[in-house]
């Protein structure tokens, strides 16, 4: 059963990585819509209107989808009986994500010099998510050799 949960952890960690990459896409699409607008009132208004759906997807994905996936990943880490180090790094994703949410709130509050760290923290989240995929991949040759090493009895 542990093997099933480890594979589920791998799949969900890839899903999380895709969701985080989508966050970058959504906000970049919104930003470029505005940045590339011509310098006229009508063009800028249209650019903000075009950016709206992308900004909305960024908000929904970032405030609902990604946090839910992180919580599922933490649960799977326990179910897969990963080491405390792995479970701790998985839980660290939740902590860093809470910081990400706080940095976004700082931006909406007008504290832009702090809110700018939202982008830097996003890179930290991306790195942690990539680590979870790389370190705990449960498919293929690497997974089979790791499973065999765990199954071998310790020689005295």
Image: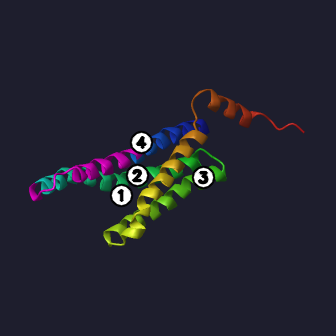
The residue at 87%/36% (across/down) is: 155
The Cα atoms of the two marked residues, 3 and 4, are separated by 20 Å
| Residue contact between numbered discs 2 and 4, judged by CB atoms under 8 Å | no
Picture quadrant where residue 100 is located: bottom left
Q: Which residue is at the front of the view, 91 or 155?
A: 91
Q: Mostly what secondary structure, the magenta segment?
A: helix
Q: Which residue is at the front of the view, 95 or 118?
A: 118
| Residue contact between numbered discs 2 and 3, judged by CB atoms under 8 Å | no
| Residue contact between numbered discs 1 and 2, judged by CB atoms under 8 Å | yes
Q: Earlier in the sequence, mark 4 or mark 1?
A: 4
The residue at 52%/44% (across/down) is: 130
Discs 3/1, front: 1
| Mark 2 burial class by Cα count in 10 Å: few <14, some 14-19, many 20+ | many
**Mark 3 secondary-structure assignment:** helix
- Horizontal and vertical percent position of residue 107: 35, 67
Q: Earlier in the sequence, mark 3 or mark 1?
A: 1
- Identify the residue under disc 4: 18
Give, as a single range, the part of the protein colored magenta.
Answer: 21-42
- Which numbered tag is attached to residue 87? 3
Q: Is residue 153 rendered to the left or right of residue 127?
A: right
Q: Earlier in the sequence, mark 2 or mark 3?
A: 2
Q: Is residue 28 magenta?
A: yes
| Mark 1 burial class by Cα count in 10 Å: few <14, some 14-19, many 20+ | some
**Mark 4 secondary-structure assignment:** helix
- Indicate whether 135 appears above or below 69: above
- Identify the residue under disc 1: 63
Q: Is residue 4 rendered to the left or right of residue 148?
A: left
- Identify the residue under disc 2: 66
The Cα atoms of the two marked residues, 2 and 4, are separated by 10 Å
The Cα atoms of the two marked residues, 2 and 3, are separated by 17 Å
- Indicate whether 141 appears above or below 57: above
């Amino acid at each position: 059963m542990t093997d099933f949960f480890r594979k589920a952890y791998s799949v969900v960690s890839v899903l999380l990585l895709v969701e985080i990459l989508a966050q970058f896409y959504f906000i970049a699409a919104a930003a470029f819509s505005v940045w590339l607008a011509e310098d006229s009132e009508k063009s800028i208004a249209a650019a903000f209107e075009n950016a709206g759906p992308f900004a909305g997807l960024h908000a929904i994905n970032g405030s609902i989808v990604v946090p839910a996936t992180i919580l599922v990943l933490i649960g799977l880490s326990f179910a897969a009986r990963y080491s405390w180090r792995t479970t701790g790094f998985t839980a660290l994703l939740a902590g860093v994500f809470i910081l990400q949410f706080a940095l976004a709130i700082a931006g909406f509050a007008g504290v832009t010099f702090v809110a700018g760290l939202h982008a830097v923290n996003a890179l930290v989240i991306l790195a942690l998510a990539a680590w979870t995929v790389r370190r705990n991949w449960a498919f293929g040759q690497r997974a089979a050799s790791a499973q065999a090493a765990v199954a071998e009895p310790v020689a005295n």
